Amino acid sequence: MKLRIPDNIEAITPYPPGKPLDELEREYGITHSIKLASNENPWGPSPAVVRALRSELLGLHRYPDGSCYKLVQAIAEKLGVDGSEIVLGNGSNEVIEFLVKAFVTEGDEVITSHPSFLMYQKFVQMRGGINYIVPLKDMGHDLGVIKEMISEKTRLIFLDNPNNPTGAVIKPVDLYTFLSEVPESVVVVLDEAYIDFVDSSLQVDIFSLIRNVEGRCPVVSLRTFSKAYGIPGLRVGFGIMSKVIAECLHKVRQPFNVNQMAQVGALAALEDEDYYQGTLDRTQKGREYLSQEVGRLGCVAYPSHTNFFLIDVKGNADKLYEAMLYKGVIIRSMSAYGFENCIRVTVGTEEENNRFLGALGDCLGELGYV
Ligand SMILES: Cc1ncc(COP(=O)(O)O)c(C=O)c1O
């Protein structure tokens, strides 16, 4: 075979896919496992979403609305922006891809942090762009070093705020200062996938940031229906940005990138205020409970502004991950992110949190970590 694989594609490590739950259970000989590994909403989708999806099934012989008119309008109204300032994607993942496609060509530079959400760097590699990766400082983005890395060739800066996997948030005052110092030619992307869980005093005014761009760098905010809105399986996310940037992104997207069920489900999710608020309240309670109880077990939970925690377990995280699996509790080891002794765990239902704590206590004892 004379297949020619470009160097930049050869160099990409595929996103590590998790095994299906039933497959994992078979492999480890377990049943009734709980998954606290992907920062999902543990309470299931809103019943209103399920009803809306059911009633949409008979329309599947038609193509979806390529402009996602109803969903765009509903989001715009809710957030107080114009529909022309919203771009929807097949998950916010796809909006990340649009940004890279629209602004990065071979040899262009993009700055990201390590560790942070993995997909930024992969999309840049696919385009033949160059990743400049800045290590986190004190578990947060090192804005000083990021600023120093900016060159004539820098096109994008990705900041997940809060950061995945640490859960840390950038202080608004630091972010405003940083943004005022970035050149006008660089687009700063604030990935706000977990913003719903962040205290309002720590959120920046994204709407003035996308509009008042005179003499300052453009800013894009990324949001998702996969976390607080509870529908990652439908794949819907969106970006909020100036109309000029939105027009560029529309040029690189497929005409029907958000499918019909996703549009209908997201609209129903957006309208179900009670479900959304309930998720935030329960997550907040679970967060407080878990951080306190994990401390009692001798581990350290880093302060989190999200629906997950980075936890220092004081011993090898891969071994703990494996031991927890045998007890039917699926979490993430963060060793691949450079945190050898840390796991990441999603806030679950009350029952799941207690099961996690029970298994963690047992495993820490068995492995002799505390
Ligand atoms: C920081 C961050 N950004 C983006 C995403 C992608 O979300 P979506 O499901 O909308 O593609 C995730 C998913 O976990 C994430 O953690």
Image: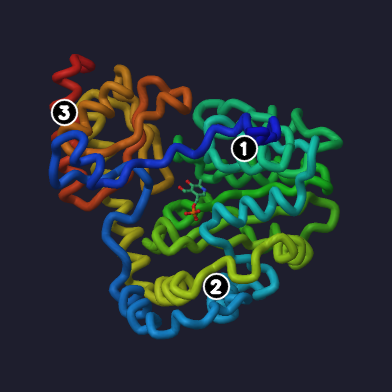
- Discs 3, 2 touching: Cβ within 8 Å: no
- The residue that mark 1 highlights is 121
- The residue that mark 3 highlights is 361
- Residue drawn at the location 38% of the way across and 33% of the way down: 310
| Residue 118 place in picture, x, y as percent | 54, 38
Tell me the kind of residue under disc 2: Ile
| Residue 301 place in picture, x, y as percent | 33, 32
Q: From where the camera sits, is residue 242 visible?
A: no
Which is more N-terminal, label 2 or label 3?
Answer: 2
Answer left or right for 168 relative to 334.
right
| Residue 41 place in picture, x, y as percent | 33, 56
Q: Residues within 10 Å of mark 3 (few under 14, many from 20)?
A: some
Q: Nearer the viewer, residue 77 or 87?
A: 87
Q: From where the camera sits, is residue 341 visible?
A: yes
Q: Nearer the viewer, residue 1 or 85?
A: 1
Depicted 336 relative to depicted 286: above or below: above
Answer left or right for 111 relative to 324.
right
Rendered image quadrant of residue 73? bottom right
